[in-house]
Image: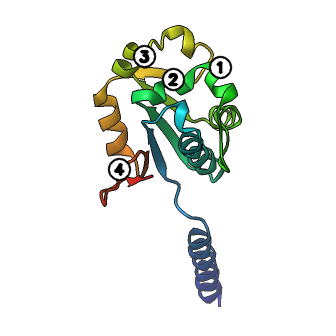
């Protein structure tokens, strides 16, 4: 009788554990790569919205800003840019930082566009070289690239 109860207890514990893992999706590591600048407000706000949503769902998120996207880190740009149906950049940025998201800015793109250390003060952001983008992409379990091009590769491209 004692053995039977132990087996039954073990089976119900196994069922509860199995059911729990089915109900809870695995947590992913997202990389959102944005290359457009403030002139394409809807597209860039969409990238920030995707990152914000992934964090709200419990995933980890890194954003890599390259090309004209490095200009998005400036306070005046964060405050002014709002996408059509995709929200306000400042609200998304603040939620991303509060949720533990991290921003990386292409060092070469930043230098070419006059983005400096002063633009990164009090932000969860740092300059990075292409090798950092490669490492982030290799570690990511999900990747979104906000760009003009289409591809059937690992990253979904918007």
Residue 57 is labelled as none
Question: Which element carries disc 4, helix, strand or loop?
Answer: loop
Mark pair 4, 3: CA separation: 23 Å
Image location of residue 96, percent across then percent down: 63, 37
Mark pair 4, 1: CA separation: 28 Å
Mark pair 4, 2: CA separation: 21 Å
Mark pair 2, 3: CA separation: 7 Å
Q: Are marks 4 and 1 in contact (CB under 8 Å)?
A: no
Question: Which element carries disc 2, helix, strand or loop?
Answer: helix
Q: Earlier in the sequence, mark 4 or mark 3?
A: 3
Q: Earlier in the sequence, mark 3 or mark 1?
A: 1
Label 1: few (<14), some (14–19) or many (≥20) C-alpha neighbours in 10 Å:
few
- Judging by the rendered image, the residue that carries numbered circle 2 is 71
- Judging by the rendered image, the residue that carries numbered circle 1 is 76
Q: Quadrant of residue 52?
A: top right
Question: Which element carries disc 1, helix, strand or loop?
Answer: helix
Image location of residue 137, percent across then percent down: 35, 43
Q: Quadrant of residue 57?
A: bottom right
Q: Are marks 2 and 3 in contact (CB under 8 Å)?
A: yes
Which residue shows up at 57% across the image and 49% down it? 50
Residue 10 shown left or right of residue 155 in the figure: right
Who is closer to the viewer here, 33 or 85? 85
Which residue shows up at 58% across the image and 38% down it? 41
- Judging by the rendered image, the residue that carries numbered circle 4 is 149
Q: Quadrant of residue 12?
A: bottom right
Image location of residue 131, percent across then percent down: 28, 29
- Judging by the rendered image, the residue that carries numbered circle 3 is 113
């Amino acid at each position: 009788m004692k053995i039977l109860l132990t087996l039954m207890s073990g089976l119900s514990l196994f069922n509860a554990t199995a059911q729990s893992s089915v109900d809870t999706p695995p947590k992913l590591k997202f990389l959102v790569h944005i290359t457009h600048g403030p002139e394409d407000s809807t597209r860039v706000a969409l990238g920030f919205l995707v990152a914000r949503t992934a964090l709200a769902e419990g995933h980890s998120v890194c954003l890599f800003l390259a090309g004209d996207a490095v200009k998005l880190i400036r306070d005046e740009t964060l405050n002014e840019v709002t996408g059509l149906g995709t929200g306000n950049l400042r609200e998304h940025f603040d939620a991303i930082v509060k949720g533990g998201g991290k921003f990386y800015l292409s060092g070469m793109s930043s230098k070419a566009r006059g983005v400096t250390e002063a633009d990164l003060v009090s932000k969860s952001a740092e300059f990075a070289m292409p090798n950092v983008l490669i490492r982030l992409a290799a570690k990511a379990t999900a990747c979104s690239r906000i760009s003009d091009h289409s591809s059937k590769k690992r990253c979904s491209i918007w």
